[in-house]
Amino acid sequence: MTVASREQAARLERRRRVRRRTRRRRIVALVLVLLLTPVVYSYVTTMVKPSSLPLSIRTIEWIRANHGAWLVDTVEHYWYSWNTPSPGGPALKKLPTVGVAEKPPAKKKTVAVAYMPPRIAPLIHPAFQLEGVWRATGQLVGGRPPVLVTTFRPDVDYPRVVAYVAWIDHTRTQLALYPGRYEPPGASPRGPMDVPTGERWRLLATFNSGFTYGDGHGGFGVDGQTATPLQAGDAAVVEYRDGRVDVNTWRGGTKLPPWLVLARQNLPLLVDNGRPSPQLFDPHAFWGYTLGNAVRVWRSGIGIDRHGNLIYAAADLQTAASLAQLFVHAGAVRAMELDINPEWPSFITYSSPGGHDAIKLVPNSQQSADRYLVPDDRDFFAVYRRGPSALVPFR
């Protein structure tokens, strides 16, 4: 074979190798396209749906819902573990101002004596002037504020942490639970996905609910309809037909019984009989699988005091155990965790009837004060002044 023939044969062989590589790459690309098309379709169709959340949070939630919860959980666990600040640090110079100053009545009126919660005793000294002092939120029912708010520093080891606490008088209010746009998935009726416009004249406050139901942490029921089965042993916030409310361990069946207006569950009790639950110290138990019991992050919860009134609380840098201690110190005899992570805790009060003059108690920069006055993706609670019907109004 001549030199020219060998060079020609080598060129042909190189061309054949290039064609084979090109064919293999095309096959691999086609396989990837076939595999990724359903993923891309799912992501795009999810992102174009109406939502109250920014794209970044919706992307994370989409990953969770599509077999990627383990990945999100792992990333969040290590992120929060590595970025938890050390104890101590600079102390606060003042507490955030919450609530509004009560206006003295134009004329003296006889007001029936009603229970008012005592000041939450400061844990860090010297205390700030209004630390733990309950303040009104702008509206009166029966001549007295039905919702009170305050702040205090709940942890001597983290003196810059602020707890945001609200107290709700059950004798003058009505609790309502509403499905959001997507949570819980099987809710019927779903309703307007925000506070019904026909009920805003008596709206006093709104606040966040618990985890998404894909995590399987309890049931949801409203007005005789059970959207997600109730689970024995999990904590539940409930409202009775006579207007009473409670936070306790669920001992009933999977369906909402006729004597209850609503029930919303989320994990076991944090506080029981005025003490933190022993399960908080069980390494196999958890309050938020992403972060377990011990990682410090924004957490929120709901409790009940010994007079049957609700207490809501949220704070940053909380473990499940520290949140339980916070509730005990605030006067709760039983309490359960609601949602966690910085995106979700919200407690909003309305200084004027009609849902006007909304004020965020929890300083959540990722949610506006209009949250729940427009359709929201997740279920939530509303607090009304007492009405004629015990049922949750959907119009």
Image (cartoon, helix red, strand yellow):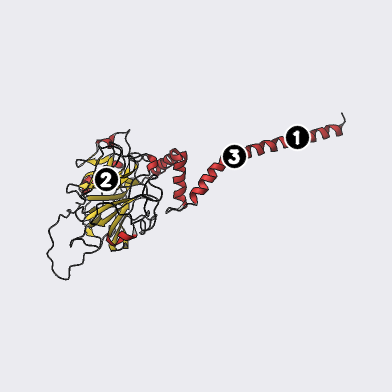
Residue type at mark 1 is Arg
Relative placement, left or right, of 204 versus 193 is left
Q: Tell me where residue 211 appears, x and y as whole percent.
A: 36, 44
* Residue mark closest to the camera, 1 vs 3: 3
Whole-angstrom CA distance, mark 2 to mark 1, is 71 Å
Viewed as shown, does residue 351 lie left or right of 192?
A: left
- Hey, which residue is sitting farthest right in the picture? 2
Q: Position of residue 174 (x, y in %)?
A: 24, 54
Task: Note whether residue 326 is visible.
Answer: no
The residue that disc 3 covers is 34
Which mark is on residue 16?
A: 1
Please, what secondary structure does the residue beneath circle 1 have? helix
Q: Residue furthest top?
A: 1
270, above or below 136, in the image: above
- Name the residue tied to disc 2: 237
Q: Quadrant of residue 231?
A: top left
Disc 2 + disc 1, Cβ < 8 Å: no
Local crowd size for mark 3, using a 10 Å CA cut-off: few (<14), some (14–19), many (≥20): few
Q: Could you tell me if the residues under marks 3 and 2 are in contact, i.e. CB atoms within 8 Å? A: no
Picture quadrant of residue 202? bottom left
Q: CA distance from mark 3 to mark 2?
A: 46 Å
First along the sequence among labels 2 and 1? 1
Is 133 positioned to the left or the right of 17 in the image? left
Q: Are marks 1 and 3 in contact (CB under 8 Å)?
A: no
Secondary structure under tag 3 reads: helix
Determine the CA span between mark 1 and mark 3.
27 Å
